[in-house]
């Protein structure tokens, strides 16, 4: 698979805009409704990106204020003027969970093309039987994997003609081996993976093994860290800044830097916020993003290697 084209060979650092969902910049997920108004326009987000020393954004329809071609062209021009790369995040929503606006690959590719995004992340959003830990390639899951493969096969020529790479994510619904199986069925140079560094936990898969499996075919990523907190009745997984959790982010970065065909790292954070204090929630969200950026720049040396 080819490398996603950027102007420099050094790794570039971006932000998955879901990290700012409390600011109204992010896809409504798991039935969450923002209790206050949107805090940033798309263009204000790009200005913030420059202030934060970011190279680009991995965004979804929660960022875009509409999907009109003329507006998308303005979005693309603004990003290009600021030297920001754009990637687009969509969901097939095969489980009918009601996630996001854009569930059609053809239309999603048109949206990405109109704003100059060169990667489209694809989520399956499939239901899984329990126990999840034992459901790898479960008979109830296989039809969704087969349907995904067929949709990607149909969409691959369009993606290639646009110069846009499709990246299938190991979301909370899939094992890395299942992603690899789908990619083997598609067998197209413009179809690869998006590896989320945490999501494997949701199906009781070792996150480091999932990263290792998917890195060689990963056009993009969600570079995320969580912390496991043990309790008397079990444990909970809590969102933290990148570098503050229980994922070995240095090892994860090395796997992506050395083996992935792309040269971008997209930070993702998701904190547990109290909705009783709007200003405190917004500040904590932004502080977590800033802390993650500092870790990626100063500890991992992203963008500074050369």
Image (cartoon, rainbow, N blue to C red):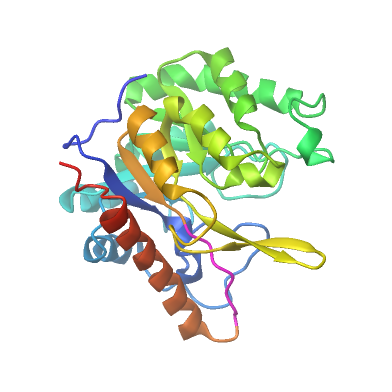
15 is higher (above) or lower (below) than 51: above
Q: Residue at x 71, y 48 (%)?
A: 97
Quadrant occupied by the C terminus: top left
What's the magenta region? 269-275
Residue 63 shows in this picture: no
Predominant secondary structure, magenta span: loop
Please tell me whether residue 274 belongs to the stretch shown in magenta: yes
Q: Residue at x 58, y 14 (%)?
A: 185
43 is higher (above) or lower (below) than 252: below
Q: Is residue 47 left or right of residue 57?
A: left
Q: Give the quadrant of residue 149.
A: top right
Q: Residue at x 45, y 64 (%)?
A: 20
Q: Give the quadrant of residue 258.
A: top left
Percent of width and height locating residue 37: 49, 76
Q: Residue at x 25, y 31 (%)?
A: 5
Circle count:
0
Residue 166 shows in this picture: yes
Percent of width and height locating residue 217: 45, 25
């Amino acid at each position: 698979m080819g490398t996603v084209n950027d102007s420099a060979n050094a790794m570039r650092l971006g932000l998955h805009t879901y990290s700012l969902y409390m600011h109204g910049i992010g896809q409504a997920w798991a039935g969450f409704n923002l209790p206050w108004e949107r805090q940033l326009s798309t263009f204000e987000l790009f200005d913030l990106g420059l202030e934060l020393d970011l190279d680009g954004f991995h965004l979804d329809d929660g960022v875009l204020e509409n999907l009109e071609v003329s507006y998308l062209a303005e979005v693309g021009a603004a990003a290009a003027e600021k030297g920001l790369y754009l990637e687009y995040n969509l969901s097939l929503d095969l489980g009918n969970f009601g996630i996001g606006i854009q569930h059609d690959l053809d239309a999603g590719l048109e949206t990405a093309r109109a704003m100059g995004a060169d990667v489209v992340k694809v989520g399956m959003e499939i239901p899984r039987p329990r126990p999840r830990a034992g459901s790898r390639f479960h008979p109830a899951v296989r039809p969704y994997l087969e349907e995904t493969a067929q949709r990607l096969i149909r969409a691959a020529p369009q993606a290639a003609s646009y110069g846009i790479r499709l990246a299938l994510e190991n979301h909370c619904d899939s094992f890395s081996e299942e992603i690899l199986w789908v990619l083997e069925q598609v067998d197209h140079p413009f179809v690869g993976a998006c590896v989320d560094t945490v999501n494997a936990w949701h199906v009781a898969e070792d996150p480091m093994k999932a990263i290792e499996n998917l890195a060689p075919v990963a056009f993009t990523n969600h570079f995320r860290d969580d912390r496991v907190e043990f309790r008397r009745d079990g444990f909970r997984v809590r969102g933290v800044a990148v570098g503050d959790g229980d994922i070995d982010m240095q090892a994860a970065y090395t796997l992506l830097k050395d083996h992935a065909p792309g040269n971008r790292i997209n930070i993702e954070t998701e904190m547990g916020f109290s909705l009783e204090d709007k200003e405190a929630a917004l500040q904590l969200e932004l502080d977590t993003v800033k802390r993650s950026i500092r870790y990626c720049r100063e500890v991992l040396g992203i963008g500074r290697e050369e």
